Amino acid sequence: MVSVFQFCIFSGHQVNLDIDPLGLAGLHEFATTHDFIGLSKHTAPGYLKHLKHGDLPRWIEALGSLPKLIPETVDLEYQVAIGHGGQTSESQQQALSHVLETLVPWRKGPFDLFGVELDSEWRCNMKWDRLLQSGISFADKTVLDVGCGNGYFGLRAIGKGARLALGLEPYLLYAMQFQVLKSYLPELPIFVLPVKLEDFQGPRDYFDTILTMGVLYHVRSPLDHLIHLKRYLRPGGQLVVETLIVDGPEGYCLTPSQRYARMPNVWFVPTLATLTKWLIRCGYQAIEVKDVTATDAEEQRATRWMPFASLQDGLNPDDPGQTIEGLPAPRRAIVTASINDK
Ligand SMILES: C[S@@+](CC[C@H](N)C(=O)[O-])C[C@H]1O[C@@H](n2cnc3c(N)ncnc32)[C@H](O)[C@@H]1O
């Protein structure tokens, strides 16, 4: 186990780093007991000192006040349900709800935690079903989920028999949300590192399946992103790209002048033909478009757990086929590719 007995000052709060709030000791242990090397940069003692976020002390405190419970039931295959309401007292449910509220907004989910139904902004089960209908298999796979949010898809991958699910998520709040779930599933081979793909140093040619879902249009260099992912995919492995797309010819991609459906950080939205060409140029083979689905308010909407603006607020109220900026409304594709030699 990594022992990180030290204190660090974040925004004037003293935080005890010994409590390992990101579960890096578990990842270190997993990596050393499996043929899984190259992670030492992220799991080394003192790593947490590099993470600077003013809310971190508050989140760590919240994690520390989670009720101590051992789930009697866990379902990751058909939903993410950890424990059940019958095993908790009202005060334990209240304490749990309080911690979950501290970590709002919950964009990804839904989760059922000891009977507390956490209805997130996205009903990720719908995307998950599209992945399964696309024939993507997770059984016995090592999975890298880039831009994993709070780890919803990694948990579902474990539910389908994945050997390892490692998520990369630079937004610290989502990594902390994952820790709430993981704290009740300490033995599962699932971990989330609070890093961007660009800063990740993991084992090369290792992962059977790499997911990059909802990330490609958020990065300023989508081709560099696709090339970067190749480092970690084993020969014969499968890349799963899930992204916004637009209609149009090969070569075209939409570059919003400023925002896209209110989102400020959307850089390039390709057509399917352009995305296919990008993948070919980056050295991928066997490219297959598996699914195209328009996003609707059944899948993405504001809830009690994400009470801020959502899809509805990004669409033109007089023409839901357009965003409020006059751009095509969100449609998303699942495209798979593989790599045989490097
Ligand atoms: C739209 S969310 C998608 C979350 C999830 N993959 C899904 O499909 O629902 C994009 C996520 O990617 C993360 N992200 C953005 N740039 C990234 C990068 N360079 N490396 C890793 N993650 C990144 C963001 O913090 C965010 O949580």
Image (tube, rainbow, N blue to C red):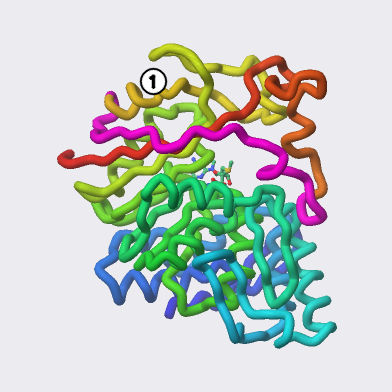
Query: Which image quadrant shows ligand 1?
Result: top right
* Res 18 seen here: no
* Res 48 seen here: yes
The residue that appears at 54% across and 17% down in the rendered structure is 254
The residue that appears at 38% across and 28% down in the rendered structure is 223
Q: Residue 339 in the image: x percent, y percent?
A: 23, 40
Q: Quadrant of the C terminus?
A: top left
Q: Residue 13 in the image: x percent, y percent?
A: 74, 65
Left or right placement of residue 55 versus residue 152 in this view: right
Considering depth in this image, is 232 or 213 the residue closer to the camera?
A: 213
Q: Is residue 293 magenta?
A: yes
Give the residues in magenta.
Answer: 281-306
The image quadrant of residue 174 is bottom right
The residue that appears at 71% across and 49% down in the rendered structure is 121
Q: Residue 10 in the image: x percent, y percent?
A: 69, 60
The residue that appears at 46% across and 79% down in the rendered structure is 187
Amino acid type assigned to the residue bearing label 1 in the image: Ala
Q: Residue furthest left?
A: 341
The image quadrant of residue 71 is bottom right
Q: Which residue is mark 1?
A: 273
Q: Residue 266 in the image: x percent, y percent?
A: 59, 28
